Image: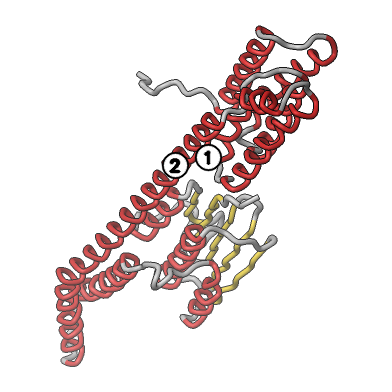
Amino acid sequence: MDTGRFRVPAGAMDWGIAVSVAALLLGTGLSGQHPGGERGLLGAVLLAAGGLALAGRRRAPLAVLAVTGLCAVGYEAAGFEVLAVSYLVAVYGAVRAGHRALTVAASVSLLVVLPLTALVLRDGSAREAFAQARNVLEIAWLIAAFAAGEALAQAERRAEEAERTREETARRRADEERLHIARELHDSLTHQISIIKVQSEVAVHVARRRGEQVPETLLAIQTAGREATRELRATLEALREDDTNPPQGLEHIPALVERARSMGLDATLTIEGQRHDVPAAVGRTAYRIVQEALTNTARHACAGTANVRIEYRPDALALQVDDDGKAAPDDAPAPGLGLLGMRERVTALGGRLVAQPGAEHGFTVRAELPVERAS
């Protein structure tokens, strides 16, 4: 059962406030003493326009501030003495958006213009002109609107700062936990695996020097020790990655291909499409996919060539690594940790990964990583 609370869209709420304020201004203005004829019609239009302008206060707070202020001057000149509720709401919105200085300047200007307008365009003494202007814009209400906007703006800034602090704290704790795990793995496993590796290699070396046949189990232990050392080293490096030692990305893939060539593999790199910046997580994942694919090709595939292709698309980064190894179309991919790690990385980014034997022979790793680009 959905227990979430119903939330009104911001646009609908703005229009609701705008229509309500326009109705309030019109009702107040037309219910009291007001001029008739064209002046009365113009004043009513300005009352309604000042209220309806509030519909855009989130998108253009300063423009709405100016429009509502001019409407207040206009209907005050036309003979309506109605509190400028629309301008007060606009003041609240502009201050909340962070435009304090401009709002103060506009409000001071309006406090000067309103009595001058009443003095020039309406009959009566200066005292009456100031009284009429005060009926349109009360200083107390203006200060209250300014204070309300400033209070909410500060509350929102504190909430953003608190959220940022929580994220930084969570990230720091995650880094600390990662390093703790790395230390524990290093202390508990590295020493024991090193002993197994060294002892097995010594046993193999001694047996061969004596001319004895080396047991298959001993060779298997030697191979497993080497592989375990390599995997553990890679795991510790991944756990220790942080901002002071940035992980490698797309720009380091050519070095991977060169390294594969130094291992006797005829590796090539092809880059297609118009290059553009990609998120750091996408670059790291692309590097790890190519690294794992080339490592598997060099160590297990008995391949002579490997082709790495990177394609920049508008909304994605596509990778493909093909080799001409011994894998046949009917062979099932070995469920190793390398393929599992690649799949987890790609899935975490919302992408797709295909790792399977080729149509005739060899193996293909193909990944598509979505890229969100700034407009």
Q: Which residue is mark 2?
A: 156
Residue 159 - label = none
- For badge 2, the amino acid type reads Glu
Q: Is residue 65 above or below residue 292?
A: above
Q: Would residue 362 be found to the left or right of residue 76 on screen?
A: left
- The image quadrant that residue 65 belongs to is top right
Q: Position of residue 360 (x, y in %)?
A: 56, 57
Identity of the residue drawn at 30% across and 61% down: 175
Crowding at mark 2 (Cα within 10 Å: few <14, some 14-19, many 20+): few
CA separation in Å, label 2 and label 1: 9 Å
- Say which of 165 and 329 sits in front: 165
Identity of the residue drawn at 42% across and 54% down: 345
Q: Would residue 50 be found to the left or right of residue 258 on screen?
A: right
Q: Would residue 375 be found to the left or right of residue 262 on screen?
A: right
Q: Which residue is mark 1?
A: 96
Q: Would residue 86 be found to the left or right of residue 358 on screen?
A: right
Identity of the residue drawn at 58% across and 56% down: 318
Sequence-wise, which precedes: disc 2 or disc 1?
Answer: 1
> Dividing the image into 4 quarters, which one contains the N terminus?
top left
Secondary structure at badge 1 equals helix
Residue 301 visible within the image: no
- Say which of 346 and 29 sits in front: 29
Q: Position of residue 197 (x, y in %)?
A: 20, 78
- Say which of 256 and 249 sits in front: 249
- For badge 1, the amino acid type reads Arg
- The image quadrant that residue 186 belongs to is bottom left
Q: Is residue 225 above or below residue 49?
A: below
